[in-house]
Image (cartoon, grey):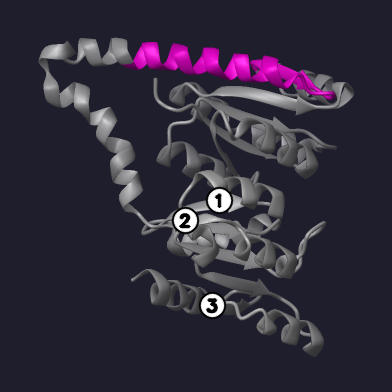
Amino acid sequence: MDSCRILLAGKNKLLIDHIFLQLDNDFECMTTSTRPDDIINHLNAIRYDAFIYCVQQEDRDDYQMIMGYKDAFLRKGTSFIVAGYKEECDLFQKTSGYMATNIYTIPLAVEDLKKTIKEVAEKNAAKRATLEAHMGGSSNKSASASPVHEPEKEAERKRILVVDDDPMVLKLVKGHLGEEYDIASAISGKIAYKFLENKKVDLILLDYEMPEENGPMVYANIRKMDSEVKNVPIVFLTGVREKEKLITALALRPNGYLPKPINGEKLISTVSKFLS
């Protein structure tokens, strides 16, 4: 069976961090913003076995937005899982018309969550095998081989990791670069380190100001990592205007920096310089 793929999103960023760190050794995990375009683009680009939404003080607009994903999840065979405190999970289910197929409350039963995801992945694999059989079975070599080659095609595209807790930045980067590059995201340094331990990237776009660990701290930690990761080009994304902070950022000798708000043409030209 292919590797299970998990997509995480939601307002509870601490819980996203925790789940990502707990699951990424067993599954292929990615994070995204809660914007509908970002979710749909992920679902269209990659087959996910499960989508985990981490709830935290959702409002009416949030619920309407999330409920809009339902048909897309059903079409893709992606299991919708909600995680959070019991009261918020219960409210989510009631307000969304019991949209989630599984609920996991804090404190999280991680092993049960892993088991659920594996069961979903096995069912999806069985469905794909049945579909392939109907399309020609083992005698049709080209039909049965096509799903195997899809990951190889994805791997040909160079990958950019965006480390930023602002979903608008991810949307902008994907809008300008998503057709040519594979865009992955991490909303914190912790997720970025875990991602880099298991996956190859060709460029890192790193926000200067983030909660917990700021950009310079994350930069320094990446440069200390073993393997070829420490040599990946890093470009700071910064809205900082204070002279002292700019001096601190430049003193680290990043491969470049882009001021916020990010200019699309400048973003494309900067990325092309490293990945062309």
Q: Is residue 179 left or right of residue 216?
A: left
Q: Is residue 29 left or right of residue 275?
A: right
Q: Secondary structure at mark 3?
A: loop
- The amino acid on which the numbered mark 1 sits, given as a three-letter code, is Leu
In 3D space, how far apart are the residues under numbered discs 3 and 1 (Cα atoms)? 18 Å
Residue ID for mark 1: 196
Q: Give, as a single range, the part of the protein colored magenta.
A: 101-128
Q: Secondary structure at mark 2?
A: loop
- The amino acid on which the numbered mark 3 sits, given as a three-letter code, is Asn
Q: Quadrant of the C terminus?
A: bottom left
- The amino acid on which the numbered mark 2 sits, given as a three-letter code, is Val
Q: Earlier in the sequence, mark 1 or mark 2?
A: 1
Question: Residues at badges 3 and 1 in contact (C-beta under 8 Å)?
Answer: no
When asked about the image quadrant of residue 84, the answer is top right
The residue drawn where x is 52% and y is 26% is 73
Q: Label 1 crowding class (10 Å Cα cut-off): few <14, some 14-19, many 20+?
A: some
